[in-house]
């Protein structure tokens, strides 16, 4: 995380935080300023009626950032929270860069982590400007003033002024470079369960998602992409299609065909009637068997293996071990399946490009649009809508690029909407992954050696725009290589094996599979040692008190060790990801017909300082269900070079009837905030798999559970 | 053809086999009803047709002529939420929010039929998909709304 980015922005502009504006040397606003509403420090607008509007640059995709980032600003601003409103960014500008990335974007459970200090600094600067304006007005020193709930008070003379009264004068001042932030004990908002600001709009249909965007003169597009990865368009029946009502254009995008029409259903129906033939290209024979065989071979490919983490000598320790436990684990590709299918609206003209997108990364869209339009950045405007789910999928640009190209081809604003079938078959997928683990126990059942090889496609290798390729892709080994159990001889290495199936970031990324691999295998090892899986972990965590605390709290919340009826059991898992530690206990039952029920999940998270506790609870609940869907049902299969699944009937999701009751406890901490959006996901698959073993004696080493004969 | 949506009569010129969903969204201009799957699997497009929860992606508009269609926008009276919507706010249910229109409409229909639904009735009626995994809170909110009846 690059915390310095925000500070550097201030320094580069002469100490004045020029956030949202380009200030001339005099401090006057010279670009995109709204005379009626002047933004303090580029983020805070105070209206005469005391309404406070705060720019929230992160993508709201359900994680509550629309509320938690403004809470950070408001905390230091000392304003009246009930008057706070939120607006999206007024322009792509480096001042709105996610401080964790240095670009405008949302991912990696980084929003609160990145903005925790910078957003508070914005609030403190705006407050200081309001205080300075009051000091001028009253003719007193700023140090004689105090602020509370949107009012500046001069107690000595019993005078006061509201922020609304002071905003105009404050806007003319230069933001102070140095401000003092509150100590944690002075927080009045941070740490309180605040009602989310976006929820009212999400119960009556008024919240605007990307798919809801309407632009004057807008046309609609439906798209079909080559079923085989890497295939291209052959022939299609354009002449007959153009005769259908409302059809404006058929566009050949080389790897896809789109129909543009005056209504979406007309475009979609015409697309269905196009009779497209495809040129399948070199990948038409790729299938699961080939992928599995290549990954298996990769596990034996010593020459290609790169070390991810090494402590002691695992090979030697295995030779001297009293008992060795070996196993191979495997997970399939997974689709994101956001509820809102991919969509984007673009309007490209000769001298402008305007884009409305449910995107996680609005910043880089500018470069993408530049590449396709040859326009300069000042001619490119990006609007970020609500996202109907993100989970990493909406960090990709494919659907945005298509919308740009279709608007160019149609000469009109175009809203492109993918069908669910396109969404499932043309996702960028959580990689398939295979691992082989050998663990050694000494004569008293202590874990003395862990040797693990992981073979999988490399996300960073296959998406070079996201960073330089690494010998060991962290995203392939995270959740295994970075485990902090005390194991004296430890080796995790990695063999990269890519396939034609595109891969990408999927909620919790590598932790989603490595959490399952590592925590399931640790359970196997505990049983081989004849020890309770919880006690076995406790012994391995005696040197890491933070993790031990989470583990012990999880066992308590999860009623570990308490009796259960026959056919029921608990499983436990502990994973660290995105800086946070999460423990989960799953309480399950399996009946004679192999029907698996997950009754209750107990979750404990240590995520440092908590901004909005109810959001943390919600993200743990959501993260568990997201991981549970993958563990129970999730598999994208490849046959004849294409995805075998189509829609929710063959890519099943957890629904209300399968969803467990989830209890969440948050560790009290004043440490720096750590990730929340993703860390709830990794522990659930191993927690349930370990519980299944406890009930049935059957060890599940390949996901999903339904492939092992269980129904849910 | 003429359609009754949220108590108002609207004229639309879509072909009769056009799914009701796309007529509501693109011709009537009410976007609270969402497209999720197109095959009546996920329930994001749920509306009431004569009070019955109906997955509008899989119903041709021609089949609802003369019937009363209610979308999520039609559940509010002025700015006042119905008890299901209010329960959703109180329980802080939505995350991304995309599926919640369908959840709320389906729950409104459920409570009209079963004012105090059992867990089994809830499981049978609310088969909509929420990818954010808000299910625990949905159950709480349904029971809150039922209690407020």
Image (cartoon, coloured by chain):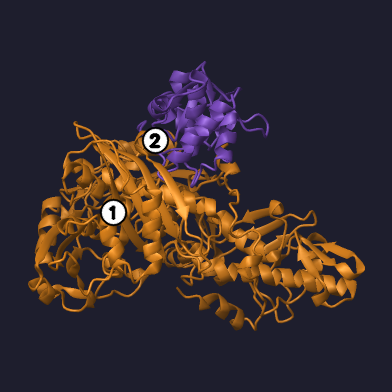
Name the residue that disc number 1 marks.
A255
Q: Relative to A191, is A136 on the left or the right?
A: right
- The vertical placement of B5 against A561, above or below, is above
Name the residue that disc number 2 marks.
A656
- The vertical placement of A648 against A291, above or below, is above
- The hue of chain B in the figure is purple
Residue A322, x across and y down, in percent: 9, 67
Q: Which chain is rendered orange in the image? A: A
**Viewer-closest of A226 and A70:** A70
Q: CA distance from mark 1 to mark 2?
A: 38 Å
Q: Earlier in the sequence, mark 1 or mark 2?
A: 1
Q: Quadrant of residue A652?
A: top left
Q: Relative to A143, is A412 on the left or the right?
A: left
Q: Chain of mark 2?
A: A
In front: label 1 or label 2: 2
Q: Kindly identify the residue that appears in the image at 22 percent across and 77 percent down.
A: A310
User: Can residue A90 be spotted in the picture?
Assistant: no
- The vertical placement of A226 against A564, above or below, is below
Label 1: few (<14), some (14–19) or many (≥20) C-alpha neighbours in 10 Å: some
Residue at far right of view: A157
Q: Which structural element holds mark 1?
A: loop
Q: Kindly identify the residue that appears in the image at 12 percent across and 65 percent down.
A: A299
Q: Chain of mark 1?
A: A
Quarter of the picture holding the C terminus of chain A = top left
**Viewer-closest of A48 and B38:** A48
């Amino acid at each position: 995380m690059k915390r310095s980015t925000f500070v550097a922005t201030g320094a580069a502009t002469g100490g004045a935080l020029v956030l949202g504006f380009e200030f001339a040397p005099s401090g006057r606003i010279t670009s995109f300023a709204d005379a009626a509403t002047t933004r303090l420090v580029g983020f805070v607008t105070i209206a005469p009626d005391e309404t406070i509007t705060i720019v929230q640059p992160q993508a709201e995709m359900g994680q509550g950032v629309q509320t938690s980032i403004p809470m950070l600003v408001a905390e230091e601003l000392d304003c009246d929270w009930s008057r706070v409103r939120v607006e999206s960014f007024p322009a792509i500008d480096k001042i709105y860069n996610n401080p964790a990335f240095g670009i405008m974007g949302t991912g990696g459970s980084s929003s609160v982590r990145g903005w925790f200090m910078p957003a508070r600094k914005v609030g403190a600067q705006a407050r200081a400007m309001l205080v300075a304006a009051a000091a001028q007005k009253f003719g007193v020193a700023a140090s004689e003033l105090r602020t509370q709930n949107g009012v500046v008070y001069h107690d000595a003379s019993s005078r006061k002024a509201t922020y609304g009264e002071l905003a105009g004068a404050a806007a003319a001042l230069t933001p102070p470079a140095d401000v003092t932030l509150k100590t944690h004990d002075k927080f009045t908002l941070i740490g309180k369960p605040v009602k989310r600001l976006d929820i009212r709009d999400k119960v009556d249909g008024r919240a605007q998602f990307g798919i809801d965007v309407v632009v004057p003169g807008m046309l609609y597009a439906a798209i079909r992409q080559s079923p085989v990865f890497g295939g291209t368009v052959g022939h299609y029946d354009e002449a007959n299609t153009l005769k259908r009502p409302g059809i404006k254009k058929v566009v050949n995008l080389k790897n896809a065909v789109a129909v543009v029409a005056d209504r979406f259903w007309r475009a979609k129906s015409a697309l269905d009637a196009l009779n497209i033939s495809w040129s399948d290209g070199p990948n038409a024979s790729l299938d699961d068997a080939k992928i599995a065989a290549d990954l298996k071979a990769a596990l034996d490919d010593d020459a290609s293996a790169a070390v991810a983490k090494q402590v002691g000598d695992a090979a030697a320790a295995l030779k001297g071990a009293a008992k060795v436990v070996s196993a191979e684990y495997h997970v399939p590709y997974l689709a994101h399946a956001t509820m809102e299918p991919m969509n984007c609206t673009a309007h490209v003209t000769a001298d402008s490009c305007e884009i409305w997108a449910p995107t996680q990364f609005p910043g880089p869209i500018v470069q993408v649009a530049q590449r396709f339009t040859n326009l300069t950045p000042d001619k490119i405007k990006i609007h970020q809508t609500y996202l109907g789910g993100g989970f990493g999928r909406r960090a990709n640009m494919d659907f945005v690029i298509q919308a740009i190209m279709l608007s160019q081809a149609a000469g009109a604003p175009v809203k492109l909407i993918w069908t669910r079938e396109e969404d499932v078959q043309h996702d960028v997928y959580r990689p398939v992954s295979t691992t082989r683990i050998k663990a050694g126990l000494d004569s008293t059942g202590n874990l003395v050696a862990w040797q693990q090889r992981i073979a999988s496609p490399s996300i960073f290798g296959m998406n070079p725009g996201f960073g330089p390729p690494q010998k060991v892709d962290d995203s392939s080994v995270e959740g295994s290589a970075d485990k902090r159990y005390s194991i004296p001889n430890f080796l995790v290495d990695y063999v990269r094996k890519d396939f034609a199936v595109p891969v990408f970031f999927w909620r919790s990324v590598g932790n989603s599979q490595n959490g399952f691999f590592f925590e399931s295998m640790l359970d196997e090892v505990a049983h081989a040692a004849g020890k309770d899986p919880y006690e076995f972990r406790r012994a391995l965590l005696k040197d890491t008190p933070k993790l031990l605390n989470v583990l012990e709290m999880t066992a308590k919340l999860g009623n570990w060790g308490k009796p259960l009826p026959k056919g029921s059991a608990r499983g436990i898992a502990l994973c660290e990801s995105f800086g946070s530690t999460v423990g989960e206990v799953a309480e399950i039952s399996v009946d004679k017909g192999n029907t698996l029920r997950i009754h209750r999940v107990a979750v404990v998270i240590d995520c440092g300082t908590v901004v909005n506790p109810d959001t943390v609870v919600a993200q743990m609940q959501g993260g568990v269900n997201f991981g549970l869907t993958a563990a129970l049902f999730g598999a994208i299969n490849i046959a004849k070079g294409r995805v075998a699944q189509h829609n929710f009937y063959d890519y099943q999701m957890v629904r209300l009837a399968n969803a467990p009751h989830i209890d969440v406890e948050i560790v009290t901490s004043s440490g720096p905030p750590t990730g929340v959006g993703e860390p709830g996901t990794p522990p659930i698959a191993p927690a349930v798999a370990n519980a299944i073993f406890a009930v049935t004696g059957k060890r599940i080493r390949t996901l999903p559970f339904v492939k092992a004969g269980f129904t849910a | 053809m003429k359609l009754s949506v949220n108590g108002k009569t609207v004229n639309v010129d879509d072909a009769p086999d056009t799914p009701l969903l796309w007529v509501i969204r693109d011709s009537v201009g009410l976007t609270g009803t969402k497209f999720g799957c197109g095959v009546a699997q996920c329930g994001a497009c749920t509306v009431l047709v004569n009070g019955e929860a109906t997955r509008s992606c899989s119903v041709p508009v021609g089949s609802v002529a003369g019937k009363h269609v209610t979308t999520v926008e039609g559940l509010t009276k002025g700015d006042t939420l119905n008890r299901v919507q209010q329960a959703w706010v109180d329980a802080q249910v939505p995350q991304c929010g995309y599926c919640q229109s369908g959840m709320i409409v389906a729950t409104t229909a459920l409570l009209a039929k079963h004012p105090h639904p059992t867990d089994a009735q809830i499981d049978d009626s609310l088969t909509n998909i929420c990818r954010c995994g808000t299910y625990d809170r949905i159950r709480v909110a349904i029971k809150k709304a039922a209690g407020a009846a």
